[in-house]
Amino acid sequence: MPKYCPSRQLLSIGSLVSFPVLANADQINAADTAWILTASGLVLFMTIPGLALFYGGLVRTKNVLSILMQCFTITSLVSILWLLGGYSLALSDGGPWQSLLGGFSSLSLASLNAESVKDNLPETVFCMYHLTFAIFAPALIVGSVAERMKFSALLWFVALWELLIYVPVCHWLWGGGWLSQLGAMDFAGGIVVHVSGGTAALVGALMVGSRRGFPRIPMPPHNLTMTATGAGILWVGWHGFSAGSALMANGAAGIAMLSTHMSAAAGSLAWMTIEWLRFGKPSGLGVITGMVAGLGMVAPSAGFISPLGGLSIGVIAGSLCFFSVHWFKRRFAIDDTLDVFAIHGVGGIAGSLLTAVLAAPTLGGIGTVADGGISGQLTVQTLAVFSVLGWSGGISYLILKLLDTTLGLRVTSGDETEGLDIVLHNEQGYNF
């Protein structure tokens, strides 16, 4: 187990599981409960309508409804899976298997009631808050395979990915599993959500293949007003993501909110500046994308760093993700439709590694968990990142291979030309 000093306030979603001394068991704190109830609503608001609108505006008119449909259906599907077994396997005590997976004590949430307590919160609130993360992670993947993947194949992929990848990774970092025991730091999902989801997105884009005409035919967003609205919701809702991850209404939540906001602002301006210098004009899409990059990269470190550290991460995020988007699309011609890996995958990896540096007290952070200071923490963070990257990438490939053999992954070329809204849902996003 990593060394831990309560005075450091190293508070994260996982820390209350790994370090229960932070709160008195069986004693509910009303202020903390009220805040986490609010934060749960904010994070769910990020997926529907936030991510749905953000992604929906970026695709072509004939596919907008399919994106909204996918986000809503994933929210419903993952919610049921979380009730039936996801929560128990991710965040309950696994006994002899604790290092790898949780147990069966909370299957179907049968053990939860109004009196159930998890540290300082009602366990129902703790469960609901984690559910919103479990929903957001696979919803991110939608953007990489947009406009050509079968709806049935996508739902099967999400269900299997949630149970075989998200649930164990969540347990490893936040449920007291082996990475938590080593001292890996992930305040608000940089590894659990962004590295795992971003990696699966890259594998999905490669397995499903490019859209017809890519990269020769321009495929611009059909409604940037919709995308900007969704991005605004993401920025606001992300404070539930970051500040809520303290699981308390305290100073750690305040630091997480402030550092997250600074990272988003700096990421937006950094992307805009590079775009302005390179192309002569700044774009609205660039400002939005840089902001999202800043939010994603600060996730693993939000509560561990200073606001100035958040600003530093934002500058790096806006710059690094700008070049990674162009690199993947132009050099490798990978049709990750909405740049999920280039933004969330790259951002999650870089942010998780930067956590080891910017959490150092000399740089305004609150300290590291692993032995050996910055170098020791960097070693642990690297191990965590590449373990999750390998697990998510490998298992995602096997799931997609199985689905390709049985259901087929993508629609026919004719159906793709006509658009998924009509072909798969017999509806249109717009009727003029």
Image (tube, grey):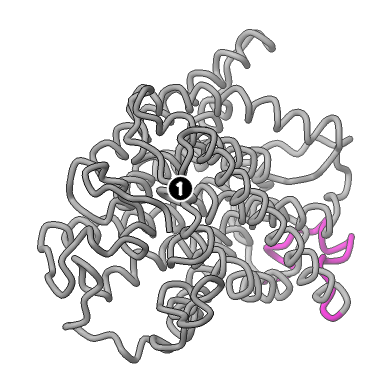
Residue in view at x 65 percent, y 75 percent: 160
The answer to whether residue 102 of the structure is visible from this angle is yes
Q: Amino acid at mark 1?
A: Met
Figure check: 146 above or below 156: above
How many marks are shown on the rendered structure? 1
The quarter in which the N terminus is drawn is: bottom left
Q: In the figure, residue 302 lies in which quadrant?
A: top left
The magenta span reads 406-426
Judged by its main secondary structure, the magenta piece is: helix
Reading the image, the residue beneath label 1 is 185
Residue in view at x 43 percent, y 67 percent: 175
The answer to whether residue 62 of the structure is visible from this angle is no
416 magenta-colored:
yes
85 magenta-colored:
no
Instruction: Estimate the x, y position of residue 287 in percent, counting from the top left.
Output: 52, 25
Instruction: Estimate the x, y position of residue 204 in percent, counting from the top left.
Output: 76, 57
Left or right of residue 77: residue 323: right
Q: Using the image as rendered, state which of residue 242 and residue 53 is in the foreground.
A: 242
Instruction: Estimate the x, y position of residue 420 in percent, counting from the top left.
Output: 72, 62
Q: Using the image as rendered, state which of residue 315 and residue 431 is in the foreground.
A: 315
Residue in view at x 36 percent, y 86 percent: 109
Figure check: 310 above or below 111: above
Q: Using the image as rendered, state which of residue 390 and residue 97 is in the foreground.
A: 97
Q: Residues within 10 Å of mark 1 (few under 14, many from 20)?
A: many
> What kind of element bears circle 1?
loop
Instruction: Estimate the x, y position of residue 132 in percent, counting from the top left.
Output: 41, 63
Figure check: 200 above or below 376: below
Figure check: 351 above or below 244: above
Q: In the figure, residue 397 lies in which quadrant?
A: bottom right
Left or right of residue 28: residue 302: right
